[in-house]
Amino acid sequence: MNPPIYSNKIHNSDIYSVSNNLIKSSYLLTSGMDAIISISDINSGKASPLINLVEHKGIIHKSIWHPTLENICASSSGDKSTKLWDIRQGNGAVKSYYSHKSQMMGCDFNKYVNEIALANSDGYVSIYDLRARDDVALTYFQVHKLACKNILFSPYFKDIFATISFDMNIRIWKQIAGKCVNLLTFSHHRGFVMGFDFSIFDAKKVISTGWDKTVYYFNWDQLFKS
């Protein structure tokens, strides 16, 4: 068995999220139950993180790097907030979003335009313009009957995103003239849908997994037949 390239115990409790910086490839972003976001450099040779971001008051369900801005990251928490961070400014979020009345479960940056999308445990999602000074959502609507576990933008299309839920459904959405249209709903799973991703090699393929112990890899061909 090959030893790991990097291993470190940098949190005091369960870690729920990890993200690899797409620009600074040695930078890792981790977060979890201890409400701390840790940024580590696997090439530094140091056991301690470069910086800890400590502002959330509850469990952090997801934290991610921005796909093109290497110093920017976001985190979604059980304290009903999603925070935007610039690690060059040290500890202290540059912006906080409080649009929802229950736990923030996930977030994602649009790869093509200045947008961030937030998923919430009340089944709603919201999309914001990152450049806006206020916290008024561009879009706010219900996508699932139960908690929305995560939201992901397509790596191919700026107006396509997907949501997954504890209602066992995966939904593909398209932004059209300020509204979001449900293009497809996949109901394969027989348990909470916990993971989902778009293929970066094939615009038509997606993958999902859930508490039903099953992984599905499938096409969403319907979009390409019209």
Image: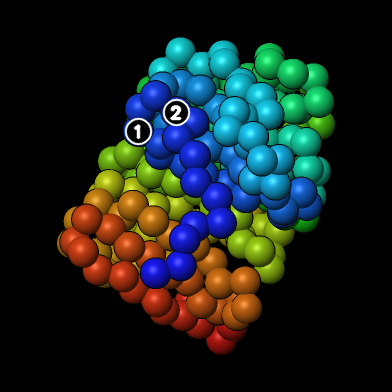
Q: Residue at x 61, y 22 (%)?
A: 52
| Residue 152 in the image, given as x and y percentages of width and height | 54, 53
State whether residue 141 appears in this view: no
Q: Is residue 166 above or below residue 121?
A: below
Q: CA distance from mark 2 to mark 1?
A: 7 Å
Tag 1: Cα neighbours inside 10 Å, few (<14), some, or many (≥20)?
A: few
Q: Give the labeled residue for mark 1.
A: 14
Most foreground residue, 186 or 203 = 203
Q: Residues within 10 Å of mark 2 (few under 14, many from 20)?
A: some
Q: Image quadrant for the C terminus?
A: bottom right
Frontmost residue, 177 versus 23 = 23
Q: How many marks?
A: 2
Which residue shows up at 71% across the image and 59% down it?
158
Q: Position of residue 167 (x, y in %)?
A: 26, 49
Circles 2 and 1: CB distance less than 8 Å?
Answer: yes
Q: Which quadrant would the N terminus be assigned to in this image?
A: bottom left
Q: Would residue 33 be found to the left or right of residue 26 on screen?
A: left
Along the line of sight, which residue is nearer the eye, 30 or 118?
30
Mark nearer the viewer, 2 or 1: 2
Q: Amino acid at mark 1?
A: Asp
Vertical placement of residue 198 versus 48, above or below: below
- The quarter of the picture where residue 33 lies is top left
For disc 2, the marked residue is 11
Residue at point 33% right, 39% down?
Answer: 147
Question: Disc 2 residue type?
Answer: His
Give the x, y percent position of residue 221. 50, 82
Say which quarter of the image contains residue 29: top right
Is 49 positioned to the left or the right of 43 in the image? left
Q: Which label was assigned to residue 61?
A: none
SS of the residue at dot 2? Answer: loop
The way the protein has been coloured in the rendering is: rainbow
Label 1: state its secondary structure. loop
